[in-house]
Amino acid sequence: MIQQLQEKAGLLDVIIGELLQYKASALEKAKTLGILPACSVSVRESSDRNGLSLAVPATLRSVSTGSQQPLSGGLTDTDDIMAEEANDAEEKRVHATTEKKISGTRNAYSIEIQSRLQFLSFVLTKSASTSLDMDTFDRLWQGLAVKYVTPGEKEAFFGWLLSTQFPSEQPGVDSRRLLSDAEATTVFASRMCDGKSMQFDRLTPTEFKCFDAFFVHCNAVAGKLSSKYASDVTVSTRNLELTGVDALWALLTTVRRSIALQCTEFYAVAQHAVPNR
């Protein structure tokens, strides 16, 4: 039995080691080509140069009244979103070229990362005695969520984290979760609520959905919200001092407009939650 456990633990080390080694090789190739890792490039600076505002949009500011007022300078949410989408399209084109250059295979770099993460999930879900410890999870977090080479790499990680932590949302997937409730709360409070690490100003829909899921689930487990995470869930506040409420406000006032418009329910919760001071 001990030998079997050691073999399974060894397999996880091999899988994760190969994944991070592949990522390191791609990073070295990017440096050789003079390409800066995406995690080191400021989206806010890029947005400011294009005249985009990253403040809370009018739609969220007036969510309780149902009205939408133009922003200062006569701009509306739609104006900024169109400009933002044009900027995003150009960034995606550049990153797609980067992914092909650094991949080392016919597939895009982020697809290679995603495939390795899916294999890791397969091994974890097929063995009840195999799990990730927090040190191993931190290696993945630092390697893929913080020090990512392309946005697609970070997106792949958060998509994997969402589907493995909340597998009941994925039809036909084993219901076993990646992290215990206590571990999930630790990850949310100490990592996801770190705006500098998460880079709220460049949050993607997948990353926002992951933050959303952990926020609701962790507060529900603590008895502060009325519902655990589920698709199209409606939540109500039981406790004004929600875990992560400061990060929630930081997210709402920093996130890109196209993402912020998806946060109306989050904003309604935040209106009744007091930042922890």
Image (tube, helix red, strand yellow):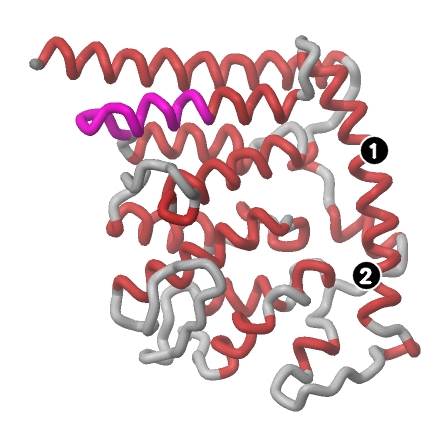
Q: Is residue 119 above or below residue 265?
A: above
Q: Is residue 228 above or below residue 183?
A: below
Report the residue at 59% width, 38% height from top: 155
x and y percent of residue 192 in the render?
Answer: 46, 51
| Magenta run includes residue 190 | no
In the rendered image, which quarter contains the N terminus?
A: top left
Q: Residues within 10 Å of mark 2 (few under 14, many from 20)?
A: some
Where residue 243 sits, quadrant-wise, is: bottom left
Bounds of the magenta segment: 118-131
Q: Identify the secondary structure beneath mark 2.
A: helix
Q: How many numbered tags mark residues here?
A: 2
Q: Residues within 10 Å of mark 1 (few under 14, many from 20)?
A: few
In the rendered image, which quarter contains the C terminus?
A: bottom left
Give the numbered dot on residue 93.
Answer: 1
x and y percent of residue 65 in the render?
Answer: 66, 90
| Magenta run includes residue 128 | yes
Check disc 2 and give the amino acid type: Ile
* Residue furthest bottom as drawn: 65
x and y percent of residue 173 in the render?
Answer: 37, 37
Check disc 1 and give the amino acid type: Arg
